[in-house]
Amino acid sequence: MSYYPSCDTLAVPAEYSADKCGIFGKNSDRDVMEAQPLIYFPPQDFQAGDQLQCTYISIEQVSHTYGFIGSKPWWMWGLEMGVNECGVSIGNEAEWSNIPVNDEDALLGMDLVRLGLERAATAREALQVITQLLEKYGQGGACKYGSPRLDSSYHNTFVLADPEEFLLLETVGKHWAYRKLKDVQGISNVYSIEDDYDGTSKDIAAFAESRGLHHPGEIFHFSKSFLLMNYHFLGGFSRSQWSTRMLKEARGRLTMEGVLGILRGHYEKDTVESRWSPVSGCIPCVCMHGSEPTRTQSAATMIVAYHKSSQKELMFTCWGSMCPPCCSLIVPFYNTGYIPERLGSGADFYEDSSFWWRVNRMVSDIESNYERYHGWLEEVRSGIEEEFQKKDKEMRGLAEKLFEEKRHKEACLLLNEFTESCLDIVEKTVAELTERIEIDMKNVPGQIYRQGYLSAYWKKAGLAGSMTERESK
């Protein structure tokens, strides 16, 4: 069993945001070689008796699945995070417990995320879907591409959200506990439900007692029973504590921009440095950058900002970016059943046709001399994102009027064209900044601590702008 620090999710129930609408946010952390495209999956209908092939196992299909936006590691069936047409948002976290994961193929936590989005119209329904499937099929299987099963298997925590409520679900094997989130919270790779749960799987206390993890007659405590008290597996504690504190300090004033700022965070004004650096890279942050030996980075970011609207299409704005969010730009998407196809490609090797890999190339270039090149990014990014957020409100207002006038197609086209225009700007910015940085890199030495890691990474990934290729010319 290996530890791969992975993922941070932020939950902001409606009463704690500036506009009294909930905000769901997540950084998906994966292996640095693993692209994570953003895809729209349309609703579908199926015949009785149909089977569904998940990542490793087949299960029974349902008669109807909802459409959803999903952030999908390229090689698996499941998702790291997503939001469906009903406004249900789900994300998962890896968890390590003193109960070993079964050495058998079952449902991945990412499969359960997708199944919840496909089959649930509310967060409560998603809770029911996931716990029933968990109890029937269990969880297990390699979660990292090409790795042995037991080396990268883990238990899972889920945040389940809709416009009305946020739920936290924590699991160990086929057992689980959940509670309604009544305050802001940052979730990471460490259990946090104590004896404050609102529900548990049947006989969970007896299960813990049978493993010597609970004393008969005492109040059952989920995290104290199942938390793996091992220094190497508690890296999520400091991240969840920091992100929760950042959220609590902004209670009542939280916006999408504030949540994005936390997801871009590296313990600013806290325990490490004022910004990310190759030295602090050995300490996993909420915004994670690849380093040895774990080679984990934030592969994608999603923020679902709910809105008060009578129109289903305007229920939320889904803001997404690819690769570590501190080095990339956000794009808005809407509940119109549309994601640009150019966001849906990428595998485990650099290709110019993949938007994810083009962003990742720029990110790794920035990391070669972060203090210098991140400043270049911020010079252009702040104005671009500020304009995106301003126009988002304007476009939603115009679309609302079109919907009220029964001009549904025009309203959806307006929103989709706005998404396309934002993506055009981001693509142009990424291309121009990558070129500018790589010209500068020929003459300006990078940060020495980062050179060895990046040189090996560029070579393995086949990045066209790699240091290895430049040095050979």
Image: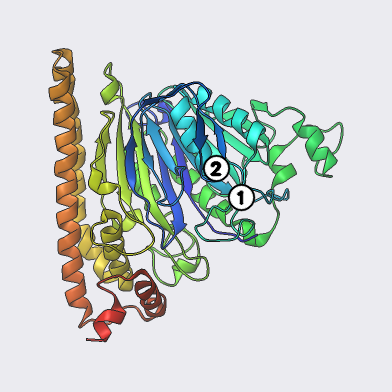
Please tell me which residue lies in front, 237 or 290: 290
- Of the two numbered discs 2 and 1 on the same chain, state the one appearing first in sequence: 2
Up-down: is 10 above or below 236?
above
Q: Amino acid at mark 2?
A: Gly
Farthest top residue in view: 405
Please tell me which residue lies in front, 427 or 187: 427
Q: Which residue is mark 2?
A: 109
Q: Are marks 2 and 1 in contact (CB under 8 Å)?
A: yes
Q: Which residue is mark 1?
A: 154
Residue 388 occupies quadrant: top left
Residue 329, horizontal then vertical, whole percent: 25, 51
SS class, disc 1: loop
Q: Is residue 7 visible?
A: yes
Residue 246: assigned label:
none
Q: Is residue 129 left or right of residue 367?
A: right
Q: Amino acid at mark 1?
A: Tyr
Residue 24, horizontal then vertical, whole percent: 41, 36
Quadrant (top left/top right/bottom left/bottom right) for the N terminus: bottom right
Residue 29 occupies quadrant: bottom left
Residue 18, horizontal then vertical, whole percent: 33, 31
